C-alpha cells in the first residue's frame, strides 16, 4: 500500500464531494470510511446504475489524489425491489 | 378513514425512467391521497422533473408534493414545479391546498423547510450576515408554514415538509449533521397552529416515528428509511383523532 498524500480525513471529504457532484451518482448522504486498507462507501442510492457508478467515481477521486487504496462499495438500493 | 400514501427522496433522474411507475401501481387501491415529501429529483433539472412527471402519470389519486434541497441544486425550482404541475401534481411551497375525500376535507400545508438544528443545539441569527441569512431563511419558511396551516379550516390538517421538524426521526443519523437535517422552528410552527400529522424526508439514515412537543405525530417517509416505495397512514375522520397543538400558544417572535 502506498502512503496516501493526504490525511484520511481530507481524502474522505474529497470522495464524499465527488459522490455528490458527479452526475453518475449525485447522492448527498453516502458514508465514506476507511477500514483497514480500503475506502468503504455505504448508504443507500436510488438506482442500480448509480450504485454501480459509486465504485468508478470513488476510484477516480482517489486516483486524482494519488491514492491507490482499494474501494469497497457497500451501498444498497433504497427501495426493496 | 382517510388513507395517506407517502414517500420522499425518490431522486428521479434519467436512469429512473420505467423504474418508479411500477412501484406505484397499487396506490389507488391503497390510498386516497399520495404525498411526496421532497427530493423529487437528483439535481433539480427540468429533464429529471419530466422523468418523474412521466412516472407519476399513471397514478390516479391526487398527488401533493413539496420540493427538497436536491430540487434546488440547478437553480430552477420554478421550472421543476411547473413541469410537475403541468402533469397534475399539486406542488406546495409555503402554501396550502384542500382535497375532498369522500366528503371529508383534507388540508395540506407544504414547505421545503430548512436546517438550523434543534432545541439546545441550534443556530442563532447572530454575528455574520451569512449566519443571519441562514437562520433567517429557516425562520421565513417556518412562518409561511404556520400561516398556511392556520389558513386551513378542514377536517384533517397535515404538514408536508422535506426537512425534519424534530430530532426523533433523525435517530440513526450522525449527531454532527442534525443542524443540516432540520429545524425546531418547523415543529414550533406546527405546534402553534395544530396538525394531525407531519410528513418529512431528507434523513436517509433516520427513523420513521417521532412526535412534536405538543404530540403531533411525525413520520420520516424517506424511501431509504421505509425501504418500500411508499407507506400508508390511516387517519380517522369521525372526530376521534385529536389535533395536536399547544394549549398555551407561544408568543410570536
Image (cartoon, coloured by chain):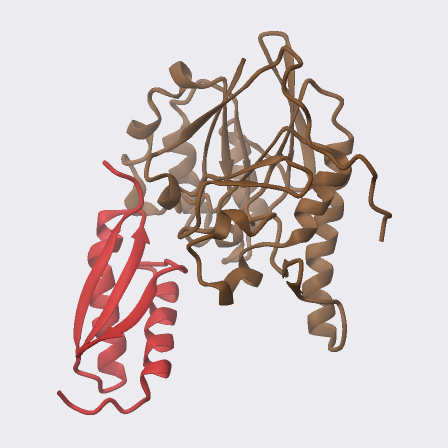
Chain colours: A red, B brown
Q: Compare residues B66 and A2 and report the one nearer the observer.
A: A2
Where is the N terminus of chain B found, in terms of image quarters? top right
Q: Is residue B12 visible?
A: no
- Residue drawn at point x = 70 percent, y = 58 percent: B137
- Residue drawn at point x = 68 percent, y = 56 percent: B138
Q: Compare residues B246 and A30 and report the one nearer the observer.
A: B246
- Quick check: B124 left or right of A68? right
Query: How many discs appear?
Result: 0
- Residue drawn at point x = 64 percent, y = 15 percent: B240
Q: Compare residues A41 and B129 and report the one nearer the observer.
A: A41
- Residue drawn at point x = 22 percent, y = 87 percent: A66
Q: Is residue B246 visible?
A: yes
- Quick check: B2 left or right of B206? right
Q: In the image as oriented, which residue stretches furthest toward the left?
A: A1
At which x and y percent is residue A10? 37, 82
At which x and y percent is residue B111? 63, 43
At which x and y percent is residue B247? 80, 34
At which x and y percent is residue A79? 30, 40
- Residue A15's place in the image compared with B135, above or below, is below
Q: In the image as oriented, which residue stretches furthest toward the top?
A: B103
- Residue B21's place in the image compared with A36, above or below, is above
- Quick check: B41 left or right of B185? left
Amino acid at each position: 500500500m502506498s502512503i496516501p498524500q493526504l490525511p484520511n480525513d481530507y481524502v474522505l471529504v474529497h470522495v464524499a464531494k465527488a459522490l455528490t457532484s458527479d452526475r453518475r451518482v449525485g447522492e448527498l448522504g453516502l458514508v465514506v470510511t476507511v477500514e483497514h486498507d480500503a475506502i468503504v462507501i455505504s448508504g443507500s442510492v436510488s438506482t442500480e446504475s448509480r450504485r454501480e457508478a459509486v465504485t468508478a467515481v470513488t476510484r477516480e477521486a482517489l486516483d486524482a489524489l494519488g491514492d491507490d487504496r482499494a474501494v469497497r462499495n457497500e451501498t444498497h438500493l433504497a427501495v426493496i425491489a | 378513514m382517510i388513507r395517506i400514501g407517502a414517500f420522499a427522496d425518490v431522486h428521479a433522474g434519467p436512469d429512473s425512467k420505467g423504474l418508479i411507475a411500477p412501484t406505484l401501481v397499487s396506490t389507488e387501491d391503497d390510498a386516497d391521497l399520495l404525498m411526496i415529501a421532497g427530493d423529487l429529483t437528483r439535481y433539480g433539472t427540468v429533464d429529471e422533473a419530466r422523468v418523474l412527471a412521466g412516472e407519476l402519470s399513471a397514478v390516479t389519486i391526487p398527488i401533493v408534493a413539496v420540493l427538497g434541497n436536491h430540487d434546488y441544486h440547478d437553480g430552477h425550482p420554478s421550472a421543476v414545479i411547473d413541469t410537475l404541475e403541468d402533469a397534475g401534481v399539486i406542488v406546495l411551497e409555503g402554501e396550502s391546498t384542500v382535497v375532498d375525500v369522500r366528503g371529508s376535507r383534507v388540508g395540506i400545508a407544504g414547505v421545503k423547510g430548512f436546517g438550523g438544528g434543534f432545541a439546545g443545539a441550534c443556530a442563532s441569527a447572530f454575528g455574520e450576515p451569512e449566519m443571519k441569512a441562514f437562520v433567517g431563511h429557516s425562520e421565513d419558511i417556518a412562518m409561511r408554514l404556520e400561516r398556511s396551516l392556520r389558513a386551513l379550516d378542514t377536517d384533517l390538517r397535515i404538514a408536508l415538509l422535506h426537512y425534519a421538524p424534530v430530532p426523533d426521526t433523525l435517530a440513526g443519523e450522525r449527531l454532527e449533521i442534525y443542524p443540516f437535517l432540520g429545524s425546531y422552528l418547523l415543529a414550533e410552527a406546527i405546534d402553534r397552529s395544530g396538525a394531525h400529522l407531519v410528513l418529512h424526508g431528507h434523513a436517509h439514515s433516520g427513523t420513521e416515528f417521532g412526535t412534536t412537543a405538543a404530540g403531533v405525530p411525525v413520520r420520516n417517509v424517506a424511501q431509504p428509511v421505509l425501504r418500500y416505495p411508499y407507506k400508508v397512514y390511516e387517519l380517522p375522520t369521525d372526530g376521534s383523532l385529536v389535533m395536536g397543538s399547544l394549549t398555551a400558544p407561544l408568543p410570536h417572535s
